[in-house]
Amino acid sequence: MNQTRRKRRTDPSLSRLESLSPEMLFPTKSPALISARVRNIFLLLTICVIVCILFSYGTFRREKISSIARSLSVFSTRRRHLLFSIAASHDSWLRRSSYVRLWYTPESTRAVVFLDRGGFDPDLSLPQVIVSKDVSRFPYNFPGGLRSAIRVARVVKETVDRGDKDVRWFVFGDDDTVFFVDNLVTVLSKYDHRKWYYVGSNSEFYDQNVRYSFDMAFGGGGFAISASLGKVLAKVLDSCLMRYSHMYGSDSRIFSCLAELGVTLTHEPGFHQIDVRGNLFGLLCAHPLSPLVSLHHLDAVDPFFPKMNRTESVARLIGAASLDSARILQQSVCYDSSNTVTVSVVWGYAVQVYEGNKLLPDLLTLQKTFSTWRRGSGVQSNYMFSTREYPRDPCGRPLVFFLDSVGPDGAEGTWSSYNLHSVGNCHRAEAVKRLQYIRVLSRKLERNVEQVYTPCFSVYYI
Ligand SMILES: *[C@@H]1O[C@H](CO)[C@@H](O)[C@H](O)[C@H]1NC(C)=O
């Protein structure tokens, strides 16, 4: 932005240069004119410097300027362009609002919460609470399902109908979803909000996608609808809902009504429905090369960090993200030339130290530390990604260090320190057996729009 401003400012000065030139050619001896001449020389020098800067920008940074210009015209989406709608219920809100409090900031996040009934005192650290309109006129006949699916689907219409100004994206999620707002802004800025977009992700659990659709955004993981699409969807939603009374959830209703408009899902891997249970370690340690956007089902999974409850764990992750949002959960693997250790850093969360050098593709697959979403003996663990077994014997696992603290390192970087998670007396190689904590220094990860399209995995040789 600065560069563009600088460019504009030079035009008037350049025209002044032309009008000054004759005076430079015919100097007089009057003291007033001499001081004017000094001023003119100074001006000329300044202009030269500006022209030089522009020239060097033009030569070496043309690409950057064009990408900035591109982002200025259409793609530059900011936090304030997003309106979050959180679907909650009176019974869940009191407890789960502690998750929302972690990612919502009253100054810079626009959000509203929809409840089935009110009765809460206003809380300025939380989004405004709205009681959903009555939906009893809509049919619902999924056996054993919950009628609230209709209310939650209609949150889309009620949100759009509010008519809030300057909204580019309507974002929907549950009260047990946490969003990484800056990363969501980065992801959405790839798309033109004036066109029709439905952005989200499906389930980690293959069978869930078979049952619903591979192209449905699962509601808890959150999804975004561009403003132009939102306006059209809001108009047709009520009549559309009448046709889908046989469906189970709110997200299938939205998916179906969007299908009728000819819109399919734009998959973004940073949204996480988290249709798994238990220990998420393996999943968090092999995050796709894409900004982390959301995590859902927080009550169904163990706390992310040892000796912490769920809220504290999420707070630690979000705290790290506040220092380097783009890098949170991004994996870097370091090899040492003497082949004694391989270090996998999952920034802001954990470091794993393997003895010997491990092959990179093996480190990128998910360790199956979690269990299936659906319980029961017949349930197969079919996932949407490659997995590897997590050794039952803790001594067969790499050394694991969890994030302890993180802070700024100069203006451009961060330090983060990770403490050993002790699992008892294992025989470890000499090179690693005394490791107690690991400190990671890194530069802030700045992705421009092109890099979001083609992310780059980090491998270091030490
Ligand atoms: C989690 O721990 C924090 C700090 O110890 C505490 O204030 C909070 O009530 C705990 N939350 C739950 C749900 O136990």
Image: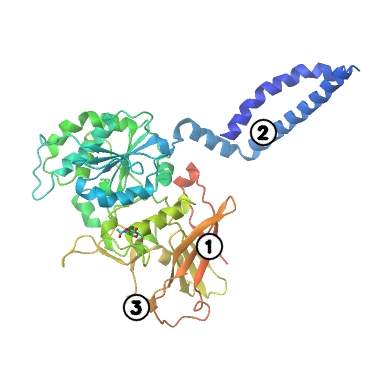
As measured in the structure, the alpha-carbon distance from the residue carrying label 3 to the one carrying label 1 is: 28 Å
Where is residue 204? Give x, y as percent.
Answer: 28, 56
Q: Quadrant of residue 349?
A: bottom left
Residue drawn at 26 percent across, 62 percent down: 277
Residue drawn at 43 percent across, 36 percent down: 77
The answer to whether 336 appears left or right of 389 in the picture is right
- The answer to whether any part of residue 202 appears in the image is no
Residue drawn at 31 percent across, 28 percent down: 163
* Neighbourhood count class around disc 1 (C-alpha, 10 Å): few under 14, some 14–19, many 20 upward: some
* Sequence order check, earlier mark of 3 and 1: 3
Q: Please name the amino acid that badge 3 sits on.
A: Asp
Q: Which mark is residue 440?
A: 1
Q: How many marks?
A: 3
Q: Quadrant of ligand 1?
A: bottom left
Q: Quadrant of residue 112?
A: top left
* Sequence order check, earlier mark of 2 and 3: 2
* Neighbourhood count class around disc 2 (C-alpha, 10 Å): few under 14, some 14–19, many 20 upward: some
As measured in the structure, the alpha-carbon distance from the residue carrying label 2 to the one carrying label 3 is: 62 Å
Where is residue 339? Give x, y as percent.
Answer: 53, 74
Q: Which mark is residue 54?
A: 2
Foreground tag (1 vs 2): 1
Where is residue 142? Give x, y as percent.
Answer: 10, 46
Q: Please name the amino acid that badge 1 sits on.
A: Val
Q: Please name the amino acid that badge 2 sits on.
A: Leu
Foreground tag (3 vs 1): 1
419 or 372: nearer the eye? 419
Badge 3 is on which residue? Answer: 393
- The answer to whether any part of residue 2 appears in the image is yes
The correct choice, above or below, for 266 with respect to 161 in the image is below
SS of the residue under disc 3? loop
324 or 380: nearer the eye? 324
* Neighbourhood count class around disc 3 (C-alpha, 10 Å): few under 14, some 14–19, many 20 upward: few
